[in-house]
Image (cartoon, coloured by chain):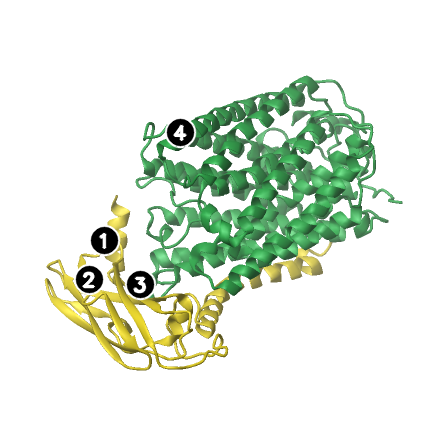
Amino acid sequence: MSAVVENHNHHDDHHHGPKKGIMRWLTTTNHKDIGTLYLWFSFAAFLLGGAFAMGIRAELFEPGLQLMDPIRYNQLVTMHGLIMIFGGVMPAFVGLANWLIPLQIGAPDMAMPRMNNLSFWLLPTAFAILLSTAFMEGGMPGFGWTFYAPLSTNYPNVAYFVFAIHIMGASSIMGSINVIVTIMNMRAPGMTLMKMPLFVWSWLITAYLLIAVMPVLAGAVTMLLMDAYFGTSFFDAAGGGDPVLFQHVFWFFGHPEVYIMILPAFGITSHIISTFSRKPLFGHSSMVYAMVSIAVLSFVVWAHHMFTVGMPLVAELFFMWATMLIAIPTGVKVFNWCATIFKGSITYETPMLFSIAFVVLFTIGGFSGLMLAITPADFQYHDTYFVVAHFHYVLVPGAVFSIMAAVYYWLPKWTGNMYDEKMGRLHFWLSFAGVNITFFPQHFVGLAGMPRRYADYALQFAEWNAVSSVGAFLFGLSQLLFLYIVVKTVFAGKKATPQVWDGADGLEWTVDSPAPYHTFDVPPKVK
Amino acid sequence: MSGGPLKNKVFVSLLGAVIFMFFFSFMLVPLYNVFCEVTGLNGKIYGPSDFFKKNNETYERQVNIRFLSTVNGSAPVTFYPSETNLEVMTDKVSRTSYIATNNTNKKLTLSIVPSVSPGLAAENVKKIQCFCFSEQTLEPYETQEWPVRFYVDSELSQNVNNVYLSYTLFEKEREEMLAANHEH
């Protein structure tokens, strides 16, 4: 964002400013530049993954095959999932971490700036490899983002998928190590762990989760590669392997992964709700303990994704109760947010609107999650659109809304300009309507028995699918408005004060807006 | 950071955690197999175990065994049980057979994977002789009868009166299969 560039002139002259042109971005080791790169990358991935989703909803607008054959449809579904998870949500959170963690703990930069540069530039490499399959004979992977073996081992171009996942994993692992080392070693004097802002806390926990499970994902895709090309039979029953084992290994990674995509959102929401209620957050330390409990529990619930594989009753009961247990720390967080809003002096700027919607809609997604956790009920819901509705409710108005809230909240700090409040609210209301029109009807068709991952469906689901598609187009188009608002704010807008928001509290609000290229050369004192 | 990241304790321990977790994912494979073997879960048929044998009164009784067959993918083989069900007494050895025909003019190498349902009955179905113990070969257009000798031990849970013994037949020529799959 160019506003940052101009500002370095005002700063102490013993610093070198950023390089000129493209080399600035290729060689940068500045946490703000790298944060910006991550955020733009994730925005691009969000639009691309969104375009795939538009293809899916266009095909599902009416029953029958209109636009594509089922193979193409499966490829769109798979790529939509992979791009949104590994290219959209995760890099957006890493971008926010890069921008905000050093500013919030009073550090001059991330602990390992060169590794930081590498972990960003691995991402476009990985996605270039993954997307290159679109131009190959055999096409893009079409086995779902969960790549269940042995379906995936018999798929064309699976090696490209495996290498892309390896590289994304390496990038995530390096990013997480950087986050933990920064937080552990570079906090300003006086900032004890329990005084850390909640976004930093949420990222500390997320980074530990990433370090624990990304290597397991790497192991899973390595076994997949060996099954596909080197004659092993980890997951192939013909050679004595077991396809159910794949699901266990995958979901051992997969369940912590879904918390990786929501914990930073909890941190963001806590900041924003407190700021716009003009009250300190209710229950700071209980928020920390809740996040730690959620993270620990995430390792013992994985088999609730696979209740129908034929597990014994004991295991089904264990995973059912363990899953339901997660509702308790999550409930603590939701009640704390409500208690923060209670009797606050609330104003409804765009970040606050997105955060309130986050609390309400994420809770709806959480409740459908509880329904899915009930083992006997899950046999009915498994692999239906009810599951699709559930995880989109926690990921779109959950993770994605929190990212949008964070962008509106910190954009004045990043660019020095206020965004257009009217446009921001319009974007919010369009997105809010779009999300609910898209995903709420999917609960109905799911409960009525519509299975997921098919390009076609029975006639009785036609009306709600048409509604769902209209909502999806509305949501998709309104994101172009978001792009317009962000670009406009980068170049123009009312100048922002250092504090930006009346009720904002934290070290990042003590530096100028836009934040100078180098901040906290001298560590601030934290009381 | 002075002295490079390798001098930093946090960094080194995190790096160690990453390496450990990578190998841990491979350790899950034997762990999973041992777990299934010990508990007899997942319909896998292994040796005796007493994990789930709680206070089951043992007495001789009649059990209905049903035989199923599945041909995996598009293996060019006709494969079916010679009888679809059998009433057997517990602890008495019974014999049945499966019939397999090679529908091609090539020699085929096959492996056949058994599975028992309900899963908890898996450890009570004891096979003495089975075509699933080793690979089978079929000459071009050959038909073979493959015998199975087995008994159901009397520790089978009283709640189970029907046991399904299912065989899935796989063609062993993986390279050819892969090549064929990669062509389209």
What numbered label is drawn on residue A238?
Answer: 3
Chain B is which colour? Answer: yellow
- Mark 4 lies on residue: A462
- C-alpha distance separating marks 1 and 4: 34 Å
The x and y percentages for residue B52 are 48, 74
Q: Amino acid at mark 4?
A: Ala
Q: Left or right of A244: which side holds A37?
A: right
Q: Amino acid at mark 1?
A: Ser
Mark sitting on residue B24: none
Please check whether the numbered discs 4 and 3 fall on a single chain: yes
Name the residue that disc number 2 marks: B79
- Labels 2 and 1 positioned on one and the same chain: yes
Give the residue type that dot 3 points to: Ala
Q: Nearer the viewer, mark 4 or mark 2?
A: 4
Q: Position of residue A478 (x, y in %)?
A: 56, 23
Q: Position of residue A277 (x, y in %)?
A: 79, 32
- Asked if disc 2 and disc 1 are in contact, CB closer than 8 Å, the reply is no
Residues under numbered marks 1 and 4 in contact, where contact means CB atoms less than 8 Å apart: no
Q: From the image, state whether disc 4 or disc 3 is nearer to you.
A: 4
Tell whether A485 sits left or right of A383.
right
Identity, as a three-letter code, of the amino acid under mark 2: Phe
